[in-house]
Image (spheres, grey):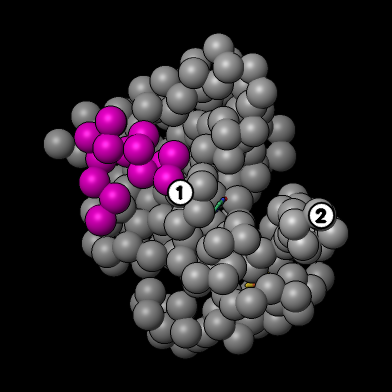
């Protein structure tokens, strides 16, 4: 199967990677999305956050985690004492996957989960970002990111918040995706998940102080 490797630049620093990813056609997702949303943050960041894929707002604006999930992430980072401008934030999949539906208020683009072929195709960009940054800590937000780095058997409900070593980073942990928290209908459960997200993020602030 085709992967993003075919579109890799010779020089693999972050600006070159970002530029090359703009032209990636390794899977069908580029066809309907507005633009590639690459990772952002300082090249010497000690912490990398990995989400699933850009959402509706991210697709329009071209930046990761700027919509509702990003807002909850920002709040949680602030409570945990982690500065967003010191971390690098990216996604496993760099193009927005969605279905369009008609609603009384017009067309809406509903997020769809990327499948394993799309994750496989796009993963070389994430690997290249991790190799370029060499972070001390990687935080996977949600199951898609966690399974991309830990393998398909990983279960967030079971192994949330536990640090492990991966090929790319000594300390890798997975926590709730902020969008999953926002979708949780049970209020008590949502509060608990918000607290767990913050306590997982504290592991970062404590270890990098
Ligand atoms: N959800 C993600 O996984 N990534 C984003 O960038 C925004 C929402
Ligand atoms: Fe390339 Fe990833 Fe976009 Fe697919 S989603 S076209 S692999 S950048």
* Magenta segment: 71-85
The residue that label 1 is drawn on is: 70
The residue that label 2 is drawn on is: 103
Q: Inspect this view and state whether residue 143 appears.
A: yes
Q: Is 208 rendered above or below residue 34?
A: above
Q: Inspect this view and state whether residue 123 appears.
A: no
- The residue positioned 51% from the left and 45% from the top of the image is 69
Give the spatial CA distance, label 1 vs label 2: 24 Å
In the displayed orientation, state which residue is furthest to the front: 104
- The residue positioned 55% from the left and 79% from the top of the image is 21
Q: Quadrant of the N terminus?
A: bottom right
Which secondary structure lies at badge 2?
A: strand
Which secondary structure lies at badge 1?
A: helix
| Residue 79 counted in the magenta span | yes
Please give left or right for residue 89 compared with residue 182 in the image: left
Instruction: Report x, y in % for residue 5.
Output: 62, 76
Q: Is 94 rendered above or below residue 201?
A: below
Residue closer to the observer: 153 or 109: 109
The answer to whether mark 1 is within 8 Å of ligand 1 is yes
């Amino acid at each position: 199967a085709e992967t993003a490797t075919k579109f890799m630049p010779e020089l693999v620093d972050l600006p070159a990677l970002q530029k090359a990813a703009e032209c990636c056609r390794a899977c069908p997702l580029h066809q309907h999305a507005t633009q590639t949303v690459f990772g952002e943050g300082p090249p010497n960041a000690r912490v990398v956050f990995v989400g699933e894929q850009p959402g509706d707002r991210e697709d329009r604006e071209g930046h990761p985690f700027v919509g509702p999930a990003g807002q909850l992430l920002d709040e949680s980072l602030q409570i945990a004492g982690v500065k967003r401008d010191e971390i690098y934030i990216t996604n496993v999949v760099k193009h927005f996957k969605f279905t369009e539906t008609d609603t009384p208020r017009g067309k809406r683009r509903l997020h769809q989960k990327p499948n394993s072929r799309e994750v496989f195709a796009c993963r070389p960009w994430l690997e290249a970002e991790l190799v370029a940054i060499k972070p001390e800590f990687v935080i996977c937000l949600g199951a898609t990111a966690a399974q991309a780095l830990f393998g398909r058997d990983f279960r967030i409900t079971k192994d949330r918040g536990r640090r492990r070593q991966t090929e790319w980073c000594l300390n890798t942990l997975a926590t709730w995706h902020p969008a999953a928290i926002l979708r949780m209908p049970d209020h008590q459960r949502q509060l608990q998940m918000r607290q767990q997200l913050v306590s997982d993020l504290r592991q970062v602030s404590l270890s990098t102080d």
